[in-house]
Image: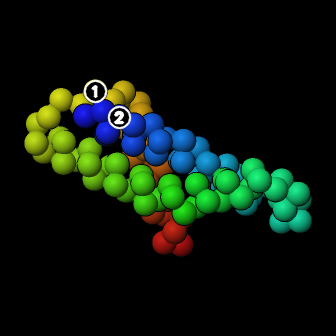
Amino acid sequence: MAGFSFFSRFAFICNIFFLICLLVNLFVVVEQAEKLGFLADTAIAMGMVLSPVLNMGVNLWFILLLLGKKQITVAKWLTAFNFLILVIQIIYFLN
């Protein structure tokens, strides 16, 4: 269960970077975003590439734990946040 807790928290961090990428995409001109350098590169890598894959895996793992009636020690707000961001990611990437 420690693995699920770790990956849930890591997915949370990646989801924060996904939200940062969306905000940068909406409010910052591309030329200004290039000036951000390392921060922009990290946000893009973790937010747009790693976050959807990891978030899908964590939510699938959560569903399997629920079906197996295992005890889940992760905070409910964290699982709800990860699921909400997964829905946003599905909408974003399918448009």
Q: Residue visible at 54% across and 48% down?
A: 14
Chosen colour scheme: rainbow
Type of the residue with mark 2:
Ser
Q: Nearer the viewer, residue 56 or 88?
A: 56
Left or right of residue 70: residue 17: right
Image disc number at residue 5: 2
Compared with 61, 44 (above or below) is below
Q: Earlier in the sequence, mark 1 or mark 2?
A: 2
Q: At numbered mark 1, what does the secondary structure look like: helix, strand or loop?
A: loop
Q: Position of residue 35 (x, y in %)?
A: 88, 57
Quadrant in which residue 79 is drawn: top left
User: Few, some or many C-alpha atoms within 10 Å of disc 1 (few <14, some 14-19, many ≥20)?
Assistant: few
Q: Please say if the residues under marks 1 and 2 sit with CB atoms less than 8 Å apart.
A: yes
Q: Residue visible at 54% across and 63% down?
A: 49
Image disc number at residue 81: none
The residue singled out by tag 1 in the image is 73
Q: Residue visible at 45% across and 37% down?
A: 9
